[in-house]
Amino acid sequence: MQGMIFTLRRKRRCLPDIRFIIRRYGSVMVFSAALALGVLSGSLVSGSIDSKVLNKLDLLFLTNLPQRLSDGAFGAFCASFGSDFIFLSTSFLLGISLFGVFILPFVAFFKGYGIGLSAGCLLISHGLSGMLFYITVLLPGICLFCLALVYQLRASLEMYRITARYLFKHCSGSYKKELRIYFRKSVIYLAAALVASVLDVILWFSLSGIYKF
């Protein structure tokens, strides 16, 4: 009987931990799920998109590998960081917008869609070597940026909640202080994206010679 009571008590103690995890990491899980869903969707439709459309999407995603390789190190860095900057700056601005909260999951989905689309295009165009190129050269930088994007989206959601409280509940305290904290977090995530782009370029021009495209 004592053993049964002890077991029930232990189970009850686990419940607050689950609530704590959901409260602290729930938004990260939601944005990560939206990103993963985008990856799956992009990979599934990669074979049915016209080449002209793919060339236009190259501004945001890697859909034209030969062009990227011919641009040189600086061109590859600008293309990679430029795309990442668009997603991070969009997330940042949505965090201080009244209706931006509804668009935040779609930012994660759209980035994931581009990742899946790029992987599918490389696999279709270059077969196994294209997929190996994606895994060994592009995936490390992509993973680092996705981590930065997910946490930027979480920071944007938190900033939206703070903004809503100040607007509708007349909270005391300094809104400028909260905005400065948000800005500092966003700069950190932007720095992570910069590191991811540098990593892309280093791996790109260190290992691209192994693959014949």
Image (spheres, rainbow, N blue to C red):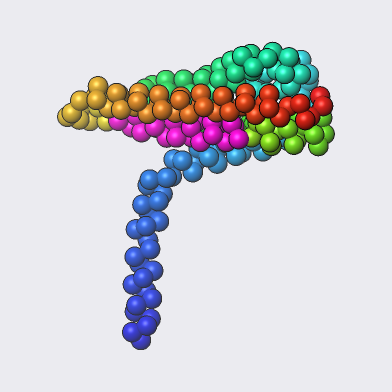
Residue 149: x and y, percent? 49, 31
Residue 148 among those drawn in magenta? yes
- Assign the C terminus to one quadrant of the image: top right
Taking the view exactly as shown, the residue that stands out farthest to the left is 172
Q: Nearer the viewer, residue 138 or 106?
A: 138
Q: Which residue is drawn at 55% across and 20% down?
A: 81
Taking the view exactly as shown, the residue that stands out farthest to the front is 206
Residue 103 visible, this orientation: no
Which region is colored magenta?
140-162
Q: Which of 141 and 113 is in front in this view?
A: 141
Residue 111: x and y, percent? 58, 29
Residue 19: x and y, percent? 37, 53
**Relative to 23, does residue 158 appear above or below in the rendering?**
above
Q: Which residue is drawn at 76% across and 18% down?
A: 66
- Assign the N terminus to one quadrant of the image: bottom left
**Relative to 82, does residue 208 appear above or below in the rendering?**
below
Residue 198: x and y, percent? 56, 24
- Which quadrant would residue 11 be assigned to in this image? bottom left
Residue 190 falls left or right of residue 82: left
Residue 33 among those drawn in magenta? no
Q: Which of 120 and 137 is in front in this view?
A: 137
Residue 172 visible, this orientation: yes
Q: Residue at x 68, y 27 (%)?
A: 206
Residue 74 falls left or right of residue 187: right
Q: Residue at x 46, y 24 (%)?
A: 190
User: How many numbered marks are there?
Assistant: 0
**Relative to 137, does residue 79 appear above or below in the rendering?**
above
